[in-house]
Image (cartoon, rainbow, N blue to C red):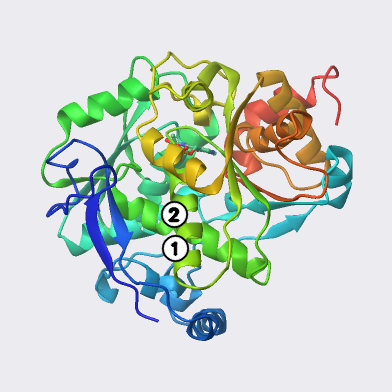
Amino acid sequence: MIATFELRCSGCATPAQRHDAPCAACGELLEFALRTEACDPGAAREYAAMVAARRANTTSLDRSGIWRWRELLPQIPHDAIVTLAEGNVPLYDVPKIAAREGVAALAFFHLGMNPTGSFKDLGMTVAISAARAEGATRAICASTGNTASSMAAYAARAGMEAYALVPRGKISGAKLAQMRDYGVRVVEVEGSFDDALAALTARAEADAAVVNSINPYRLEGQKCTAFALLEARSWRVPDWVVVPGGNLGNSSAIGKGFREALALGLIDRIPRIAVVQAEGAAPFVQLYRSGRDLVPIVPHTIASAIAVGAPRSWRKARAELDASHGAAVSVTDDEIDAAKKRIGAAGIGCEPASAATLAGIARLRAEGSIAENDDVVAVLTGHVLKDSDASLRVADRSDVGA
Ligand code: F0G
């Protein structure tokens, strides 16, 4: 199965020459659009079997849960690829939590079990590899901590310098420590993630690759979440896939992955995508539910990873929710803490932003969007050790029960 992709605008579909600038015609973000027309299900099944068989090989590309899908990714010379064996993550069934939420099945797809402890590695391996192939010597990003940690690790592997712009005092100490371990240069910016991203855009230099999710290579890696999840379920499509939303690159990427799996004949329907945001950082929920465009806000939430007030990929995420008949919902910080306690009590654990998914499922179930007989997957995006202060705080709370 050979898939071809065209770099073009995600808004007006104008073909683009460069991947590192917004659309010259309308200013929207770019994407790699799949060109392949539907292939027959036999060929798709054969391809899936070949990808599964690659697991048994010992080459670094086949050991990567991302590069195993390399025919479905932008083509990058193999000697430029930087991998840390990302993408081989567990799917945990949680029948007791499913019963309590009143759904037929619930599982956590734990992307926090990646090399640097978050889903960012899935995209970073592609973004840093593409940057290396183009001869970049430096990588830069704005971050609430996970993007920067992931960038720092992959840049170090590639022998590139890395610079992270982070909101001062608003990211977890564990993430700051982790990124510094990999040797990143940290620039603290006053304000929120949005201010850090604005500062980055203002100072971006030609030889530094910007590896935030505005970089279309990042999302190509992250779309493999959809393939890996389907593979882990023997290609049984769930009814809902629930994802925490910050800058909204990940929900956009996952939606794209499912649509491509459908177009390629790997599946015959797509799951509904639900985006969950923290109540104090929910500009996407507001716009999706009101039908209006983005109104930026100043974000406040204990889930520091998703404290984003002006998500750059909101149009892409809206398109994915529309395409999948999805939903957007916000949850309070107390609900996030309670959900985090329950995920910990199941022996799994995650950082607060990821726990928002379980809190969101409860909300969506209560409002009837998720039904009693639905089969639901929550995407946990960050490892429990990513925010140890939050774990200590939540463990000491007796008012939120497990
Ligand atoms: N979960 C975690 C643990 C995150 O770190 C992020 C984003 C998200 C969810 C939301 O993903 O932005 O694609 O909608 N973290 C970014 C960062 C902002 O800088 O690490 P999104």
**Count of labels in the image:** 2
Image quadrant assignment for residue 325: top right
Above or below, comparing residue 122 to residue 284 in the picture: below
Residue under the image location 34 percent in, 15 percent down: 190
Along the line of sight, which residue is nearer the eye, 321 or 92? 321
Is residue 154 at least partly visible in the picture? yes
Q: CA distance from mark 1 to mark 2?
A: 6 Å
State which quarter of the image contains the N terminus.
Answer: bottom left
Would you name the residue on which mark 1 appears?
Answer: 260
Query: What's the residue type where badge 1 is placed?
Result: Glu
Assign a secondary structure to mark 2: helix
Assign a secondary structure to mark 1: helix
Image quadrant assignment for residue 157: bottom left
Along the line of sight, which residue is nearer the eye, 137 or 102? 102
Is residue 188 at least partly visible in the picture? no
Above or below, comparing residue 157 to residue 169 in the picture: below
Crowd tier of the residue under label 2, counting other residues whose Cα lies within 10 Å: few below 14, some 14–19, many 20 or above: many
Along the line of sight, which residue is nearer the eye, 137 or 399? 399
Q: Which mark is residue 102?
A: none
Residue under the image location 44 percent in, 63 percent down: 260
Horizontal placement of 235 versus 224: left or right? right
Horizontal placement of 252 versus 97: left or right? left
Above or below, comparing residue 231 to residue 329 in the picture: below
Residue under the image location 44 percent in, 45 percent down: 252
Image quadrant assignment for residue 90: bottom right
Q: Position of residue 369 (x, y in %)?
A: 70, 36
Q: Position of residue 75 (x, y in %)?
A: 27, 70
Query: What's the residue type where badge 2 is placed?
Result: Lys
Would you name the residue on which mark 2 appears?
Answer: 256
User: Mark 1 touching mark 2, by CB under 8 A?
Assistant: yes
Ligand 1 has an atom within 8 Å of the beta carbon of the residue at disc 1: no
